Image (tube, coloured by chain):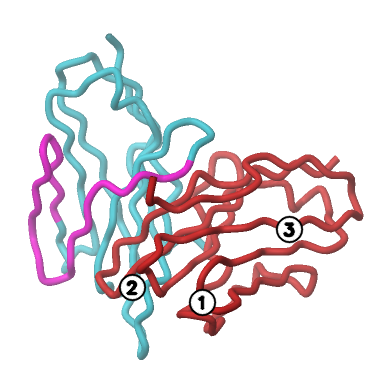
Amino acid sequence: DTGVSQNPRHKITKRGQNVTFRCDPISEHNRLYWYRQTLGQGPEFLTYFQNEAQLEKSRLLSDRFSAERPKGSFSTLEIQRTEQGDSAMYLCASSSLKDTQYFGPGTRLTVL
Amino acid sequence: SQQGEEDPQALSIQEGENATMNCSYKTSINNLQWYRQNSGRGLVHLILIRSNEREKHSGRLRVTLDTSKKSSSLLITASRAADTASYFCATDAVRGTSYGKLTFGQGTILTVHP
């Protein structure tokens, strides 16, 4: 399978703990995006990488959130001091210059 | 914030019927994409239509784009129970440096009854 993969698929954590998610994009794609989706809503943009450079961060991405893409390959999204409001599906997508974004299966985060 | 609005919010039809979903957006766009999402899963890309295109087909899907009205429609012909899912439109707005950030609507929940 050469699609976008995300790990873990599910994460349950207690409020105040730190969590880290991983995204492996399609190998030849230089663009990588993170989105967040809450129940009954469409995904909302969080951040974007072109190769290893993080070019934009949404206002949704508070100081507790950080994302990296070392060497322009996989990416990680870390949430520090999780809050119940962070509970959501975190989606990763990748694309080439042809614009179509391909999404991974998502990581569902539940903060207790 | 959500740029697009899908209409209707929910649609229930019988297998074999056609399903039409509409999407409106607010700003000028480079392209508009439609995605399908089965319950609790990731998004599957269906079709991309660029701002200089008016209509596009892919299998049982037909997408139209009217940039003067800032609207798009997705038609699924001869629907099947397996088409049951949420459908989202997503726009890539025109910016000085376009990099493909998508803004999604709230989606249309389609239920196809066997």
**Residues at discs 1 and 3 in contact (Cβ within 8 Å):** no
Query: Could you say which disc has been placed on residue B27 in the image?
Result: 2
Residue A99 sits in which quadrant? bottom left
Q: Quadrant of the C terminus of chain A?
A: top right
Could you tell me the amino acid type at mark 1?
Gly
Residue B44 is inside the magenta segment? yes
Identity of the residue furthest to the bottom in this view: B96
Identity of the residue furthest to the top in this view: B114
Q: Which residues are magenta?
A: B42-64
Q: Which residue is mark 1?
A: A72
Q: Which residue is mark 3?
A: A20
Which color is chain A depicted in?
red
Could you tell me the amino acid type at mark 2?
Thr
Label 2 and label 3: CA atoms lie apart by 34 Å
Decide: few, some or many residues near mark 3? Use Cα within 10 Å; few <14, some 14-19, many ≥20.
some
Against A10, is B2 above or below? below
Q: Residue at x 73, y 58 (%)?
A: A20
Label 1 and label 3: CA atoms lie apart by 18 Å
> Residue A31, position in %: x, y?
42, 73
